Each structure stands twice: as C-alpha cells, then as structure tokens.
Image (cartoon, rainbow, N blue to C red):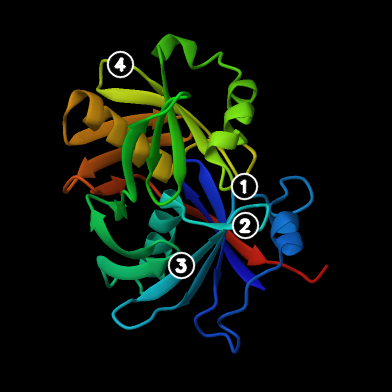
C-alpha cells in the first residue's frame, strides 16, 4: 500500500489516497493504525489521513485517525491533506472544498502556505480547570508565563485533565499557551493530544482554540503561535469561523507491506 508522509509544523501523518481504489470506503483497523503510527516498529506518525471521494460539491472527503484508531478532526491534518491534494493535481488548483468528520471546509493557497477554515462548534467558556473550546474537537486552554513553558512537565499536568470526568466521555486535548507574546508577536504553546496520549509538536485545532480564547479575553482578529514544531497563524473571519495557516512538507513516500 503506497503512502505519503506529510509534516505540518511538526504534526506528522501517514497519508493514503483511496479515491481510485475499488473499496474507497475502506478504513484501516485500530491495530493497523497503531502499528503504522508506532515510531519504533512502524512508519511513525501522529495519525493517518485517508483521502476519499468527495460528495456533491466537495473535491474530496478527509478521514483522520488518531494512533489509537479513533476518528477525529485534525486542523493540521486538514491543511496537510489540502496541500497533498493540490500536489496531486500538479499544483493546478489553489482552492478546494472538502468534507471531514465535522462538516464542510475550504482550503486556499495563501503566500506559499496551505490555509483551511475551522468552525468553532462551541465558543470559549470558563470551567474549573481552564477555558474550554470546541474547534472541531475538544480543547482545554491553560495560560502560563512564557518562561515556564520550556521546563513544564506537560504530561504530568495534562493527563489528569485529559481524562477528567468533567470532559467525559470524549475527553479533552490540553493546550498550554503563553499569557503574553514574544517580541515578534508570537504566543508560545505546547499541546497534549488525546488519541496520541502524549505531546505533539503542534496542533492546528488547538491553535485555533487558543486564538479563540485570546480573542475572547483580549480582543483582536489575527494571532501568531510558535509551537515546538513550527509556527502557525490564525485569522478570524467571524465569531465562529477562523483560518488556520502554516507550513506543510512532504518529506518522503513509501510502501506499507503486509504484516
């Protein structure tokens, strides 16, 4: 089975194009997904992207699977899939419409980077643990001084929150964001992702969630973030719609052999 490896600001994915397959609705089992995403015994990835035929008005449908096999929406995965789709079209198209678990999305090529829109299913609200936002999936946003982020034991902080009963049964991703920007206007952030059950180098939907909290608390329409894997930008189109931009690389392709 042929695959492409995609890297979206440190979020990496195994991408499979199923559009021309006899069984385009096929989905790998949780065991297969876990094996492929394993960084020692498999290809290694934060998840699997499946590009499937699109319905009416859609260029393709995107299915994203976490390493544990659970389906979710992934903002960086959506950007990576759009960039990949564009490359398969020999860079002929700078705009796409595609569907994912949470509905219809648009992709645009802006200043050399793929940009996709995300919808806030739930605006920021205070909880006893931090600010909750649903930006395609569930996020808990915690603020912290920028100088504290590098040495933070993120797993120890995040695991009790990720599984907390207040967020059951779906659970929650935990994003720690600097309370102030650096001299270049970037907010530092780190993310613990459910499904991965560990830290990822960046998180697209979490970045949009963090921007929504900053907009809610301090105002503004455009925000820049610096994650361990790279930089991402968010620009709000309206209260519930935001554009997420950032780099995507395609470092290699390969073949997954039968186990």
Marks 4/1: CA–CA distance: 29 Å
Say which label, 2 or 4, has the lower sequence index: 2
Q: Residue at x 60, y 33 (%)?
A: 164
Say which label, 1 or 2, has the lower sequence index: 2
**Quadrant of the snapshot with the C terminus:** bottom right
Marks 1 and 2: CB-CB under 8 Å?
yes
Give x and y (percent) for residue 8. Answer: 45, 47
Element on which disc 3 rests: strand
Instruction: For label 2, count other residues whose C-alpha is less than 10 Å away and answer few (under 14), some (14-19) or many (20+).
Output: some
Q: Is residue 9 visible?
A: no
Please name the residue that numbered disc 2 is placed on: 70
Instruction: For label 3, count other residues whose C-alpha is less than 10 Å away and answer few (under 14), some (14-19) or many (20+).
Output: many
Marks 1/3: CA–CA distance: 17 Å
Q: Residue at x 41, y 51 (%)?
A: 75
Give x and y (percent) for residue 10. Answer: 50, 41
Q: Which label number is shown at residue 62?
A: 3
């Amino acid at each position: 089975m042929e695959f492409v490896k995609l890297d979206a600001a440190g979020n990496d994915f195994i991408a499979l194009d199923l559009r021309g397959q006899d069984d385009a609705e096929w989905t790998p089992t949780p065991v297969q997904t876990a094996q492929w995403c394993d960084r020692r015994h498999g290809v290694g990835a934060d998840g699997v992207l499946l590009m499937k035929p699109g319905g009416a008005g859609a260029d393709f449908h995107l299915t994203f699977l976490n390493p544990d096999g659970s389906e979710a929406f992934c903002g960086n995965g959506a950007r990576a899939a759009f960039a990949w789709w564009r490359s398969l079209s020999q860079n002929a198209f700078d705009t796409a419409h595609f569907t994912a678990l949470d509905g219809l999305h648009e992709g645009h090529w802006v200043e050399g980077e793929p940009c996709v829109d995300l919808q806030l299913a739930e605006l920021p609200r205070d909880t006893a643990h931090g600010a909750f936002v649903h930006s395609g999936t569930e996020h808990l946003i915690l603020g912290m001084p920028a100088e504290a982020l590098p040495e933070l034991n993120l797993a120890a902080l995040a695991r009790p929150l990720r599984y907390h009963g207040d967020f059951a049964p779906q659970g929650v991703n935990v994003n720690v964001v600097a309370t102030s920007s650096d001299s270049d206007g970037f907010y530092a952030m780190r993310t613990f992702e459910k499904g991965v059950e560990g830290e990822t180098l960046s998180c697209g939907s979490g970045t949009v969630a963090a921007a929504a909290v900053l907009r809610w608390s301090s105002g503004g329409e455009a925000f820049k973030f610096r994650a361990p894997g790279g930089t991402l930008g968010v620009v709000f189109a309206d209260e519930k719609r935001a554009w997420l931009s950032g780099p995507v690389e395609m470092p290699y392709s390969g073949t997954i052999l039968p186990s």
